[in-house]
């Protein structure tokens, strides 16, 4: 999940979510709950906007205890770092992060090339991937921020 809309850095250097960002994330999370989405762990980059997004998502999914910070999810981190986290886990995960990192990670998982943009992320959107087998990953669905009206 890409974090929700955040305040511009010149307004607030910490870049918290805007009211619109909070509402869009909550809306996406409610839609995810209706779809039966569950995650054993919700990992975020540690940046305030990602933390707030993860907390809203966890609250709406009823999984507040499962939120934690993880290395390798910052905007310019090498997607291989997150790939190692994913591969080392036998749990269902939701990663909350930033562009360009998330786009690069999804491209790495789907086509093995982090330089190809396969999914056009939007702030507050939730993208679901599934590990098919040892042979790779597939895109399952995307919930955009305007989902659920």
Image (tube, helix red, strand yellow):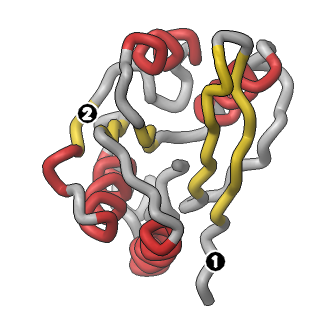
Coordinates of residue 86 in the picture (x, y in percent)? 46, 20
Instruction: Point out the residue furthest to the left here.
Output: 65
Which residue is drawn at the image coordinates 36% and 34% (left, top)?
A: 45
Towards the viewer: 73 or 41: 41
111 on left or right of 40: right
Query: Is residue 99 placed above or below 125 in the rendered structure?
Result: above
Coordinates of residue 142 in the picture (x, y in percent)? 68, 57
Q: Which residue is mark 1?
A: 147
Query: Is residue 55 placed above or below 115 in the rendered structure?
Result: below
Q: Secondary structure at mark 2?
A: strand
Coordinates of residue 143 in the picture (x, y in percent)? 64, 64
Snapshot quadrant of residue 107: top right
Coordinates of residue 40 in the picture (x, y in percent)? 30, 40
- Density class for disc 2 (Cα within 10 Å; few <14, some 14-19, many ≥20) is some
Which residue is drawn at the image coordinates 55% and 23% (left, top)?
A: 76
Q: Which residue is mark 2?
A: 69
Towards the viewer: 131 or 142: 131
Snapshot quadrant of residue 105: top right
* On-image quarter of the C terminus: bottom right
Snapshot quadrant of residue 108: top right
29 on left or right of 98: left
Which numbered disc covers residue 42? Answer: none
Which residue is drawn at the image coordinates 70% and 54% (left, top)?
A: 141
Towards the viewer: 36 or 87: 36
Q: CA distance from mark 1 to mark 2?
A: 27 Å
Towards the viewer: 78 or 16: 78
Tell me which label, 1 or 2, sits earlier in the chain: 2
């Amino acid at each position: 999940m890409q974090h929700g809309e955040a305040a511009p850095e010149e307004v607030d250097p910490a870049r918290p979510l805007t009211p619109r960002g909070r509402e869009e994330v909550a809306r996406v999370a409610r839609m995810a709950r209706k779809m039966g989405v569950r995650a054993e762990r919700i990992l975020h980059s540690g940046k305030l906007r990602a933390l707030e997004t993860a907390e809203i998502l966890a609250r709406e999914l009823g999984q507040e205890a499962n939120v934690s910070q993880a290395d390798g999810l910052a905007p310019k981190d090498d997607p291989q770092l997150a790939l190692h986290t994913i591969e080392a886990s036998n749990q269902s995960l939701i990663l909350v992060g930033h562009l360009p990192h998330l786009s690069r990670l999804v491209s790495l998982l789907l086509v093995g090339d982090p330089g190809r943009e396969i999914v056009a992320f939007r702030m507050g959107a939730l993208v679901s991937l599934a590990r098919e087998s040892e042979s790779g990953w597939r895109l399952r669905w995307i919930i955009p921020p305007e989902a659920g009206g």
